[in-house]
Each structure stands twice: as structure tokens, then as C-alpha cells.
Amino acid sequence: MGGGCRGCMGQVRPTYIKRIAIELVKNHGDRFTDDFDHNKLQVAELTDVSSISMRNRIAGYATRYRKQEQA
């Protein structure tokens, strides 16, 4: 079941995705921007995450985190 309205509300992300993304942005802040595609490449380069979906989730949160910092 589940599914429902995927775009209606924000997704709840596991703590480990947030922790990895925040750690990457704090340690390598100059390499991350508010561009998701750029951040995907940075996550792939800086981590050993083998799953593409996990890389994308980390990059997505890093992008949101950078946007929040700039606001």
C-alpha cells in the first residue's frame, strides 16, 4: 500500500542521509552549491556510496541544506 500523494508534503529522510550530507557540506563546503546535478558528482567523488539512489538522496539533502544556509 503506501504511495499516496508523493508530491504533497516533504519527504522524511533517514538520519544517516542527513548526517552524511551535513558532514560533507561542513567539511567540503566550497565544493557544494545549490545545483543538484553538480552535488551528485561531488557526492560520488567524496564518498564510497555504491547505490545511485542513495547518492541522489544524499546529494538532494545537501542541496536543500545549502539553500537553507544561504537563506
Image: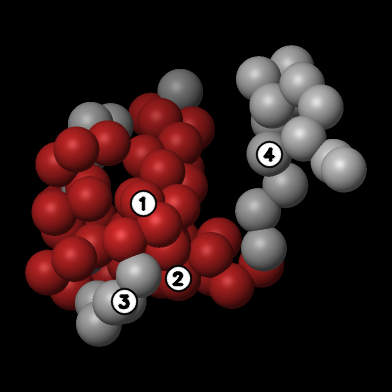
- Gap between marks 4 and 1, in whole Å? 14 Å
In the displayed structure, 67 sits above or below 43; it is: above
Question: In the rendering, which numbered label is found on residue 49?
Answer: 3
Badge number at residue 56 = 1
C-alpha separation, residue under disc 3 versus residue under disc 4: 21 Å
Left or right of 30, for residue 26: right
Separation of disc 3 and disc 1 at Cα? 10 Å
Q: Quadrant of the N terminus?
A: top right
Q: Earlier in the sequence, mark 2 or mark 1?
A: 2
Q: Are marks 3 and 4 in contact (CB under 8 Å)?
A: no
For mark 4, does the 10 Å Cα neighbourhood hold few (<14), some (14 to 19), or many (20 or more) residues?
Answer: few
Q: Which residue is mark 4?
A: 11
Q: Could you tell me how far apart the alpha carbons at marks 2 and 3 are, in whole angstroms?
A: 11 Å
Mark nearer the viewer, 2 or 3 = 3
* Residue 16 can be seen, yes or no: yes
Q: Judge from the rendering whether residue 54 lies leftward or rightward of residue 35; answer left or right.
A: right
Lower sequence index among marks 4 and 1 = 4
Image position of 17 with respect to 63: above or below: below
The amino acid sitting under disc 4 is: Gln
Three-letter amino acid code at the position of disc 1: Asn
| Element marked by disc 3 | loop
Residue toward you, 41 or 32: 41
**Residue 26, visible in the rendered structure:** no
Q: Which residue is mark 2?
A: 20
> In front of the other: label 2 or label 4?
4
- Residue at image location 18% in from the left, 73% down from the top: 46
Identify the residue shown where x is 18% and y is 66%: 44
